[in-house]
Image: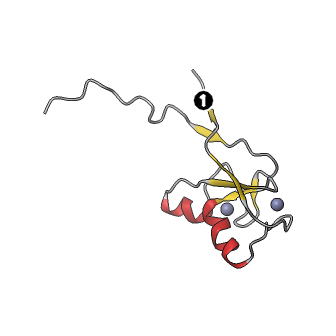
Amino acid sequence: MTSSPFVIKKVNMFSGWVYDLPKNTECTICRCNLNTHSLYYQEKGIHSRVLTGICQHSFHNECIEPWIKKNKHCPICSTKWQVKTEVSEIVRVTHGQ
Ligand SMILES: [Zn+2]
Ligand SMILES: [Zn+2]
């Protein structure tokens, strides 16, 4: 096998990332910053995704999902929960160099 001429360079190019969050930067369910993974996912090493509702509040996907199954309202403002956007990693933060 010859090695691929294409070199994957993006791995570890970024030392961090932040979400562009309209209102809250902390997930009130697991009390972690939304720019970090939820507690559950930190343990498992899985990337959290963040969902923003029509009320502009944001939560980890895996935190709001079980909550919504029971409550159907935003944990912060009690607006009926409806996902407005799935926030992706909008702003990448590069360090140094
Ligand atoms: Zn969370
Ligand atoms: Zn809300």
| Ligand 1 within 8 angstroms of badge 1 C-beta | no
Residue farthest along the left direction in this orientation: 1
Q: What amino acid type is highlighted by mark number 1?
A: Thr
Q: Name the residue rendered at 41%, 28% in the picture.
A: 9
* Residue 67, picture quadrant: bottom right
Is residue 88 among the parts visible in the rendering? yes
Instruction: Answer whether residue 33 is visible to the viewer in this image.
Output: no
Colouring convention used in this rendered image of the protein: secondary structure
Task: Name the residue located 45 percent from the left edge and 31 percent from the top edge.
Answer: 10
Dot 1 crowding, Cα within 10 Å, few <14, some 14–19, many 20+? few
Instruction: Say which residue appears at 74% left-offset and 72% top-offset.
Output: 72
The residue labelled by disc 1 is 94
Q: Is residue 12 above or below residue 43?
A: above
Q: Is residue 87 above or below residue 26?
A: above
Name the residue: 20% across, 29% down: 3
Residue 2, position in %: x, y?
A: 15, 29
Quadrant location of the C terminus?
top right
Q: Give the residue furthest to the right.
A: 77
Q: Which quadrant of the render holds ligand 1?
A: bottom right
Quarter of the rendering containing residue 93: top right
- Vertically, is 7 above or below 48? above
Tell me residue 30's x, y (percent): 69, 66
Q: Is residue 35 or residue 86 the one in the foreground? A: 86
Residue 89 in the image: state x and y as whole percent: 61, 42
Where is residue 59, by image quadrant? bottom right
Observer-nearest of 25 and 64: 64
| Side of 27 relative to 79 (left or right) | left
Q: Residue furthest bottom?
A: 70
Q: Judging from the image, what secondary structure is the residue with disc 1 in?
A: loop
User: For this rendering, which residue is in front, 96 or 93?
Assistant: 93
